[in-house]
Amino acid sequence: DEVIELDFDQLPEGDEVISILKQEHTQLHIWIALALEYYKQGKTEEFVKLLEAARIDGNLDYRDHEKDQMTCLDTLAAYYVQQARKEKNKDNKKDLITQATLLYTMADKIIMYDQNHLLGRACFCLLEGDKMDQADAQFHFVLNQSPNNIPALLGKACISFNKKDYRGALAYYKKALRTNPGCPAEVRLGMGHCFVKLNKLEKARLAFSRALELNSKCVGALVGLAVLELNNKEDYSKVQHLALHAFHNTEVEAMQAESCYQLARSFHVQEDYDQAFQYYYQATQFASSSFVLPFFGLGQ
């Protein structure tokens, strides 16, 4: 038998790989492995092409191929969800969400109660905003099977926070941290927000600072510290440094609006009205219609 070898360091164009895989009637799991390699290399267009083709042309003539079918659909769906989160155009966002919904629904029909599938679906429900209870039920199902499942613990923390159950959210974050002390900075960030809501400001400061030690570009922690400094009426230059740093480290408009708003507040307090006006105005440019504070600032 002849073997075709593909060097990961020099992967050919996606179309060429697809034609080789089709010709050789290659098993689906190999299509997925190659697609993920393209993704790791930042070649997302090829990644999508390969997974879309794999759904139709992947060879399913082997044991347990259903799991790979589900993985193929879920991986593609998760990518579309990720794109939808970044997308600013409402119509494009809606299209991406529709594509993801379709793929997750197809995967449901293959293995509905697989943990990874349920986690992906639950995160998607969170993104959609109006399906919080559905997401909660799916995270709950996973935790019943695996009480220390970190993505499910973080999902439950997020839902508890949104329901204003800050102690409950904190308990989930702490459990995730005990399970894996090497959790990413976002876990400390979440804890920091809980501490702020529980009025434990020194603990919040420590949590935000720890998040920044783990990831110096953690925008939420930069903004969190800036707000704490400002409310302390302490070092305004420090506030400005933190908020500017946050502004330059994110492309998320809501975070840019928040950073500009905190900058404006610090200049306003110091009676530097020109600078304050400039940043209030900039905040209104980035803000969604629900973030009204910059508009009040402009009015003042």
Image (tube, grey):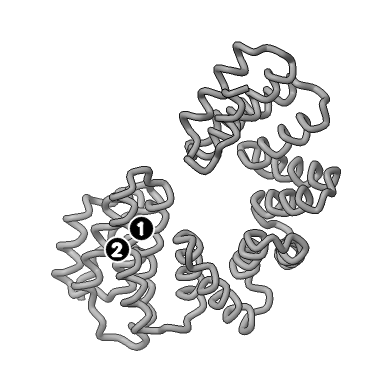
Q: Mark 1: which secondary structure? A: helix
The answer to which of 49 and 29 lies nearer the viewer is 49
The answer to which of 105 and 278 lies nearer the viewer is 278
Q: Position of residue 270 (x, y in %)?
A: 74, 15
Which quadrant of the structure image shows residue 31?
bottom left
Q: Give the alpha-carbon distance from disc 1 to disc 2, as whole Å.
A: 7 Å
Please report the residue visible at 71 percent of the width from the left and 13 percent of the height from the top. 271
- 106 over 212 or under it: above or below: below
The answer to which of 24 and 241 lies nearer the viewer is 241
**Quadrant of the image containing the C terminus:** top right
Please report the residue visible at 31 percent of the width from the left and 77 percent of the height from the top. 106
Residue type at numbered disc 1: Tyr
Q: Mark 2: which secondary structure? A: helix
- 128 over 285 or under it: above or below: below
Q: Position of residue 38 (x, y in %)?
A: 34, 53
Mark carried by residue 80: 1
Mark carried by residue 300: none
- 70 over 150 or under it: above or below: below
**Quadrant of the image containing the N terminus:** bottom left
Mark carried by residue 99: 2
Estimate how packed mark 2 is, as few (under 14), some (14 to 19) or many (20 or more) residues with alpha carbons within 10 Å: some
Question: Contact (CB < 8 A) between labels 1 and 2?
Answer: yes
Q: Position of residue 39 (x, y in %)?
A: 37, 53
Estimate how packed mark 1 is, as few (under 14), some (14 to 19) or many (20 or more) residues with alpha carbons within 10 Å: many
Q: Position of residue 205 (x, y in %)?
A: 80, 41
46 sits left or right of 187 in the view: left
Please report the residue visible at 76 percent of the width from the left and 40 percent of the height from the top. 209
Please state the total of marks drawn on the protein image. 2
